Image: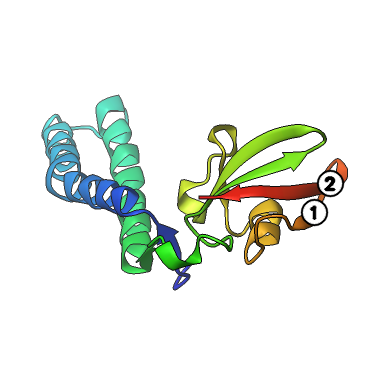
Amino acid sequence: MQGDTQYLSADSLDNLKKEYETLKNKTIPDIAKKIDEAKQQGDLSENAEYHQAREEMSWAKGRLNELDEIINNAQVIVKNAKQKNKVELGATVTVKVGGNERKYTIVGQQEADPAKGLISNESPLGRAFLGHETGDKVEVVIPVGRQVYEIVKIG
């Protein structure tokens, strides 16, 4: 992931920055206090609180590094009002597939949540939709086979 552009909405970037600040300024110092208090109790080999705090610190520092990487490589998705006729990052696409209508929003990898209709621009479906226009039929190879999606609306 190092150095890869991370496409995010402005809200998601703000949330990640808040999480970063909370980890850095509250969570990690609180864990450091727990570790210090546990050290003062003496024998660390059998001190469960010490080992638990060390694991929490390891996770928190790892998450802090991950957030730092994401934030430093973030590119905010800006919807282009002129591009309503083509599918691009940030667009919401209504498609017909197998007689059913479905709605997907093309987002960056960090925000993808297929159950909520948020699909990554790097997923087979998201990648297939990019650049297409209303009325286009897009054939996508997915785990269950080939599917043809007709783009009904782009918003």
Residue 108: mark: none
Helix, strand or loop for disc 2: strand
**In the image, is 70 to the left or to the right of 50?**
right
142 sits left or right of 17 in the view? right
Is residue 82 visible to us here?
A: yes
Question: Badge 1, how many Cα within 10 Å: few under 14, some, many 20+?
Answer: some
In the rendered image of this protein, does residue 134 appear above or below residue 143? Answer: below
Foreground: 19 or 52? 19
| Residue located 80% across and 33% down the image | 99
Per the image, the residue denoted by label 2 is 147
Residue 132 in the image: x percent, y percent?
67, 63
Residue 114 x %, y %: 59, 39
Residue type at mark 1 is Val
Residue at 49% across / 56% down in the picture? 108
Q: Residue type at mark 2?
A: Gln
In percent of width and height, residue 112 lies at: 52, 46
Position of residue 37 relative to residue 2, above or below, is above
Label at residue 140: 1
